[in-house]
Image (cartoon, grey):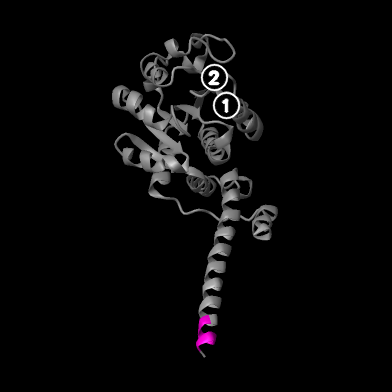
Amino acid sequence: MGLTVAVPILTRFALPEPTSPLSQAFFDRVEELPPGSKVLISLDYDAATEGELGPMTTAFLRHCCLKGHKVCLLTLWPTGLPLCDQNIRTVIKGEFADLNWQYGVDYVNLGFVPGNEVAIKLLAQDLRKAFPTDVTGTRLDELPLLKDVRSARDFDLVIDITAGTPGGKEWVQYAVTQGGLKLALGSVGVQVPQMAPYYPNQIVGLLAAIKGAAEYESALAQRYPERISLKRSAATQRMGPQLWAHLLMVGLILLGNAIHFATQRRGRR
């Protein structure tokens, strides 16, 4: 098992993932937005689920950079604040540094807002009451990206990456149902059965755990092969060891059963 897991990691083995309808709907929604559209991304998770949800955030930010969308990051979890900084540093200032995005014009980090469900409802009604300033202390009216944005409803798309409460369910209940947002979700695997019934009426797309993130990366690599490589895509790289480990387990089960029945036949003879 150790060898089976280690080889794909060391060789960066990567296979494109067939895109499910839920993942394709998510990708198409971001892709079809005209360049310069405003996208709000809420990172409602922590370091414990970063391995599952972090690749989603990276994929969304890459897609927004490639399409020229304006990005606004926030989090309803206090532990999500370092994740906002990390993704800005690695994607916007790192991988896509050649775009020369300007803070306040092309992207904004609003930081953490307390209040859970109350905060979501407030975001859908009045952004400035939820966030008087951004994470640097700058008033929102001084940021060109948010100058004409009065609530979360003014964004062309809201993306929530959810690991629990507050998260996707609360965004649907307090923002979509009451506020009329256009919402897409990325969720940990255990929450997917709760989130899936919201599609397509309340949400426009859903990524299911690391598998959904790998599907999104595959769609992104197919659309933008000159900038996106599956060998540098985290979710796809993590699917390789899982694939071979599962194949090994199935093979051992079949081998064990074959030995069992062969032993029985020999005993009868």
Q: Is residue 115 magenta?
A: no
Amino acid carrying mark 2 in the image: Gly
Residue at 32 percent across and 34 percent down: it is: 202
Mark 2: few/some/many CA within 10 Å (<14, 14-19, 20+)? many
On residue 111, the disc is 2
- Residue 63's x, y, as percent? 52, 37
Mark 1 and mark 2: span between their CA atoms? 7 Å
Question: Residue 169 is drawn in which quadrant?
Answer: top left
Q: Residue at x 37, y 22 (%)?
A: 153
Q: Which residues are magenta?
A: 264-268
Residue where numbered disc 1 is placed: 84
Counting from the top left corner in percent of width and height, residue 43 is at: 51, 29
Q: Quadrant of residue 171?
A: top left
Q: Residue furthest front?
A: 267
Question: From the viewer's perspective, is residue 49 above or below residue 236?
Answer: above
For the stretch drawn in magenta, the main secondary structure is helix
Q: Check contact, mark 1 vs mark 2: CB within 8 A.
A: yes
Q: How many marks?
A: 2
Residue sitting farthest toward the right? 10
Q: x and y percent of residue 41 in the render?
A: 48, 28
Residue at 60 percent of width and 45 percent of height? 233
Q: Which mark is residue 64?
A: none
- Within 10 Å of disc 1 (Cα), the crowding (few <14, some 14-19, many 20+) is many
